[in-house]
């Protein structure tokens, strides 16, 4: 019987939730307790506590209330050292657009029934499995990829089926993270890269790339225009034919201003 139970334990989704209102915390805790595949690893009552617990416990999924004291759910994303899958929860639907701009997996409008919560977690589970599969492939090819990168004078490696593309960092406008994948845009095509955005950020810091958002790494040499945006953020316009627009986080805006002395 132990052989049967072990896979179920290993497959459990590690969930943390952040909610500042006691009735909502109790309801969500009860809903999650009814799901056998969920392991609640932590609970936060405000934004600062959520940041500490997320960075320390590294949950798979975070159910994150948007309106919390001191630091709200939208702001704290940029302050995390660890990036889990995010599902936002709120009583106000005007935050929906900004929530999805922050690359959340789903958005739950309170009060939500357990069926809606299950649907959101099922979506998160699917994304989690995709990320794990991607990480497994990356770990198998990691050493080979970096060896090839060194031998080709700082080229980025993009694999597509049986084809391998060697990309010059200077030709890349920006790199974005989408559903666990890193995609490099050269103004014509998105090329899939094996490395994560965190790895690329460190590798390309000397090539004038700057992390302006948890989902964007931009080549400063290809920035055409910068506009002031909402809540201390900036809108970066790239010098490609479609004038790609990339919204920074507040932390990313500060980093870009410091780099460009603006």
Image (spheres, rainbow, N blue to C red):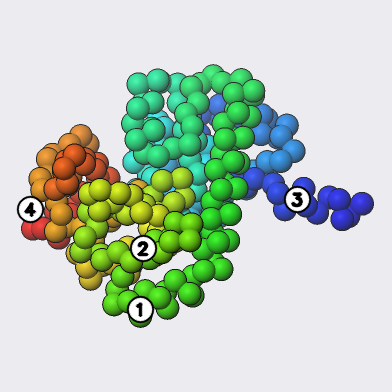
Q: Residue at x 38, y 26 (%)?
A: 96
Q: Taking 258 as reference, is 80 left or right?
A: right
Residue assigned mark 2: 165
Disc 3 crowd, CA 10 A, few/some/many (<14, 14-19, 20+):
few
Residue 17 can be seen, yes or no: no
Depth check, front residue: 184 or 220: 184
Dot in front, 3 or 2: 2
Which disc is residue 150 wearing?
1
Of mark 4 and mark 2, the one earlier in the sequence is 2
| Quarter holding residue 133 | bottom right
Of mark 4 and mark 3, the one earlier in the sequence is 3
Disc 4 crowd, CA 10 A, few/some/many (<14, 14-19, 20+):
few
Depth check, front residue: 205 or 15: 205
Residue 156, how many percent across, how many down? 34, 66
Residue assigned mark 3: 9
Gap in angstroms between the C-alphas marked 1 and 2:
15 Å
Depth check, front residue: 47 or 140: 140
Gap in angstroms between the C-alphas marked 4 and 2:
36 Å
Disc 2 crowd, CA 10 A, few/some/many (<14, 14-19, 20+):
some
Q: Taking 228 as reference, is 70 left or right?
A: right
Gap in angstroms between the C-alphas marked 1 and 4:
34 Å
Report helix, strand or loop for mark 1: helix
The mark total stands at: 4
Which disc is residue 262 wearing?
4
Residue 219, how many percent across, how many down? 21, 57
Of mark 1 and mark 3, the one earlier in the sequence is 3
């Amino acid at each position: 019987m132990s052989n049967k139970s072990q896979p179920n334990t290993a497959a459990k989704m590690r969930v943390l939730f952040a909610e500042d209102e006691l009735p909502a915390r109790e309801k969500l805790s009860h809903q999650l307790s009814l799901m056998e595949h969920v392991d609640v690893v932590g609970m936060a009552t405000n934004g600062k506590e959520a940041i500490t617990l997320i960075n320390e416990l590294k949950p798979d999924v975070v159910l994150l209330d948007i309106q919390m004291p001191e630091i709200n759910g939208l702001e704290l994303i940029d302050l995390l050292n660890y990036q889990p899958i995010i599902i936002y929860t709120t009583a106000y639907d005007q935050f929906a657009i900004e929530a999805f701009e922050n690359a959340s997996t789903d958005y739950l409008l309170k009060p939500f029934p357990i069926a809606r919560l299950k649907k959101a977690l099922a979506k998160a589970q699917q994304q989690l499995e995709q990320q794990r599969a991607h990480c497994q492939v990356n770990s198998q090819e990691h050493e080979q990829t970096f060896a090839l990168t060194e031998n080709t004078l700082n080229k980025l490696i993009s694999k597509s089926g049986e084809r391998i593309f060697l990309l010059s960092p200077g030709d890349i406008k920006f790199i974005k993270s989408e559903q666990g994948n890193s995609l490099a845009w050269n103004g014509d095509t998105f090329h899939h890269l094996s490395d994560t955005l965190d790895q690329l950020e460190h590798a390309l810091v000397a090539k004038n790339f700057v992390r302006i958002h948890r989902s964007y790494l931009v080549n400063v040499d290809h920035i055409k225009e910068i506009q002031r945006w909402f809540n201390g953020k900036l809108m970066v316009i790239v010098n490609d034919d479609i004038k790609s627009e990339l919204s920074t986080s507040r932390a990313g805006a500060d980093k870009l201003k410091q780099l460009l002395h603006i």
